[in-house]
Amino acid sequence: YNEYKSYLRIMLRLSSRLLPRFTKVCKRDFSSSSPRTITTHYTVIDRATDDRWTDVDMERYVDEVDVAVVGGGPAGLATAIRLMQNAQRQGAEIRVCVIEKAPDIGSHTLSGAVIEPEPIYDLFPDAIEQGAPLHTPVKKDQFSVLFKNSSIDIPELLLPMKNHGNFIVRLGHVVKWLGDKAEELGVEIYPGYAASEILYREDGSVKGVATNDVGIAKDGSPKDTFERGMEIHAKTTVFAEGCHGHLAKELINKYDLRKSAQPMTYAIGIKELWEVSEEKHDPGLALHTVGWPMDRKTYGGSFLYHVNDGPLVALGYVIALDYTNPYLYPFKEMQRWKTHPRVSRYIEGGERIMYGARALNEGGIQSIPELVFPGGILIGCDAGFLNVPKIKGTHNAIRSGIIAADCIFDGIEDGSLSLEQGTMLDSYDKAIKDSSVWKELVACRNVRPSFSTALGLWGGCCSSWVLLMAYTGLFYVFLGGREPWTFKHHVKDSDSLIEAKDAPQIDYPKPDNKITFDLLSSVALSGTNHEGDQPPHLTLMDDSIPINRNYAIYDGPEQRFCPAGVYEYVPEEEGDGYKLQINAQNCVHCKTCDIKCPSQNINWVVPEGGGGPGYNGM
């Protein structure tokens, strides 16, 4: 691992030095470079037309289960656990399998995180006695609006999150514990196997999923070690991939599940874990901030949690992906935020030990797609159940998994779910809408989109936030979302950027390597790793678009909105012009590129199973 980190640092340094600082005009002048072959992935390049695949055996092994769950996070594991609990209570025998792309359960999980424990208690009333890693009850709630060099605290009465009774956790450890409990109950868990393809019956219903093929070279050709993936057929398939799942994206398009919903809006969350001195450690403190360094048009905020697991502080910055300036650099905004006295006081003299990033849903109830389709359902963050003002989604993810399991088990018992045909599990849709999940999302529906109204755009950044906090306090905290109006999300995040020629460039301070750091050292702390000789899983629908549109018009925003240095525009080896270089091995699976690309030309798909970040309790 240390050798890999050294290699990563060298590779990133060399590639970054190849990227000179040119003006926007120069970059537009060079935008006519001829298209290059970048994408070799079989989801874009049809293997049926590739002679190198002519004699390759493409038969796949098939297994049949009662329920297939795609994704071993909180929602997926809750579904599997509740199904097996129901089966044990009824004396029934069922097969439930969980397919997870991470090599170990929890190693791709990243969240703040303060969680509401009640859904975990619903699964295991004696969870703490059984060893659930709920070690840090929240003892103090603080919320500050930041100015450049000062801050004001918001009275606790107005806070949208009430954390009494909640726990600060390292969510990856909670997920690992849930995985262990699932296996004890008889759930079949397959870590290191990425579900890459949805299988359909002749009637168009979902039949199950297939895991991805392995042993494919970077140029798209089969290696001697090539192995076909496995097909898993199920009576119903539960999609619990997390935010912006790539299979859920396909399902939403195929079944037009967003036909009655507004565009989903997202944010990028960038997180670090620090070891700090005992004197600065305050176990149970949960601090949130808004305001600086965001401008008045950009929605963003932060968290800083003191974890009672050694003297640890988990801190992160969240920026909405509907920002307009293509020169905004979320990673560098997070570094700049750490220099504020309200934040730096806790981490000065400490050591940063982990780094990661993840996209999160912010659309709320206005953006939730239809949850049910023939043969399957969406749960958790695949559906978009995050409560934005609470900055919490884990409790709703687990709750949705429990609800799904109860509905699925009833369908198995009464025979309405079968391997032969795909059934619409309408009972799940009704149960969700009758649940606390839906009630919560209705109540908070206007908090996030209110920022795009006159409340958010009036005056300077901090005065905007004061107005928004007043709105949130009145209508969400006191009135529970009973206002008779519902604000809308009007623009997709990918359509929000203005052209580079109209955007002010942003001068970010250089890292001091004490509080702030460069991207190179940060990515190394994510533990991310992929097999190098495989087709890049960041696929382009058209290899010419990055240079001819994204670079020419928006000055290549991919190289800034990606928090892992995956995308670089570098000079051509011969002649003038630039090319897009994709460092797929650096990817931390945040999905930001798939969401924010202004041309919607990037399609994130799963790499070979086991690849990705190596988080330990993030």
Image (cartoon, rainbow, N blue to C red):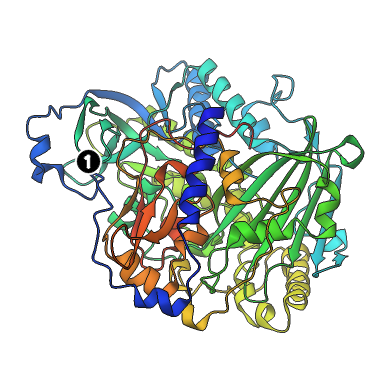
Residue for badge 1: 220
For mark 1, does the 10 Å Cα neighbourhood hold few (<14), some (14 to 19), or many (20 or more) residues? many
Q: Nearer the viewer, residue 225 or 324?
A: 225
Residue pictured at 52% horizontal, 31% vertical: 77
Residue 569 visible to the viewer: yes
Q: Quadrant of the N terminus?
A: top right
Q: Position of residue 447 (x, y in %)?
A: 65, 67
Q: Position of residue 208 (x, y in %)?
A: 29, 35
Residue pictured at 26% horizontal, 45% vertical: 41
Q: Nearer the viewer, residue 373 or 412?
A: 373
Up the image or down, 340 lies above or below 527; here it is below
Up the image or down, 401 lies above or below 507; here it is above
Q: Position of residue 463 (x, y in %)?
A: 77, 78
Q: Position of residue 469 (x, y in %)?
A: 76, 69
Identity of the amino acid at label 1?
Gly
Q: Quadrant of the C terminus?
A: top right
Q: Is residue 186 left or right of residue 551?
A: right
Up the image or down, 303 lies above or below 477; here it is above
Q: Is residue 440 left or right of residue 185?
A: right
The number of numbered discs placed on residues in the rendered structure image is 1
Q: Quadrant of residue 442?
A: bottom right
Residue pictured at 73% horizontal, 84% vertical: 459
Residue pictured at 32% horizontal, 35% vertical: 533
Residue 1 visible to the viewer: no
Q: Is residue 132 left or right of residue 206?
A: right
The residue positioned farthest toward the front in the image shown: 575
Judged from the image, the secondary structure of the residue bearing numbered disc 1 is loop
